[in-house]
Amino acid sequence: MTNNLYNELKFVIIGQGSQIIELIRKMFSLEIMPNNLKIITVNGDFNLSCLEFLSYYAIDYDVCDKRNFKQIAYSTIANFSPNIVISFSNPFIIREEILNLKTKFINFHPGILPNYKGSLSTVHSLINNEKFVGGTWHYLDKGIDTGNIIKIVKTPLKHFNAFTLNHKIFSLGIDCLEEIIEKVKNNYLGTRQEKTGKFYYKKFPDVSNLDDKLQKRILYFPPKFL
């Protein structure tokens, strides 16, 4: 289904780490060229492989932190005028002022919405002994993980630990990237989320009351393997 019209699309990607590398490799396979990309990412030893990858392929990027993210994101998106902004492994909240810019904003959330909003969805999926886990491509709105759903990807929980599960979910999200771009390009509105589910905060839960095997699966969690 590869469409050479992708050559005419411009993208801003906001994210970090190896997930961004794999996402961009997938975009290259869709004939999206480096000069059609702008990246907003972060500094730090953990992100060196990403920065080296971007430099090697001469992809323009800016690094930022919480203090200047809003300014850099607004300026980059306003000046580059992308067709689509992709939030992928993104550590920042994109506020309404940025979302008001004239483009389409999408995010990949490593949890099934609306059931697992917020952080550490893989950990809580293990605690809740879900039969299936996954991730959600959705449009961004002024809420957190509340925008219209574009596509949900799922996999059986099986014997994943939190580390392998995290990689599996991001891989599933990348695998369907062409379908997502096609839908967004063609103004697919997505499905409104039901007002159900739970929001999980970025605080690692107490797992001391769980059995030893489940604790080991949960605590083997990136970036620190406990």
Image: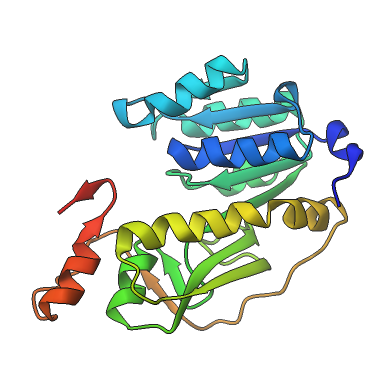
Residue at 55 percent across and 22 percent down: it is 54
Side (left or right) of 84 relative to 131:
right
Residue at 45 percent across and 68 percent down: it is 117
Camera-side residue of 185 and 198: 185
Residue 148 visible in the snapshot: no
**In the picture shown, does residue 63 fall above or below 29?**
above
Camera-side residue of 119 and 45: 45
Camera-side residue of 130 and 62: 130
Residue at 55 percent across and 72 percent down: it is 154
Q: How many callouts does the rendering have?
A: 0
Side (left or right) of 180 relative to 2:
left
- Where is residue 219 shown, x and y percent of the image? 19, 62
- Where is residue 103 shown, x and y percent of the image? 76, 43
**In the picture shown, does residue 6 fall above or below 171?**
above
Residue 198 visible in the snapshot: yes
Residue at 27 percent across and 78 percent down: it is 127
Q: Quadrant of residue 180?
A: bottom right
Q: In which quarter of the image is the C terminus?
A: bottom left
**In the picture shown, does residue 148 fall above or below 28?**
below
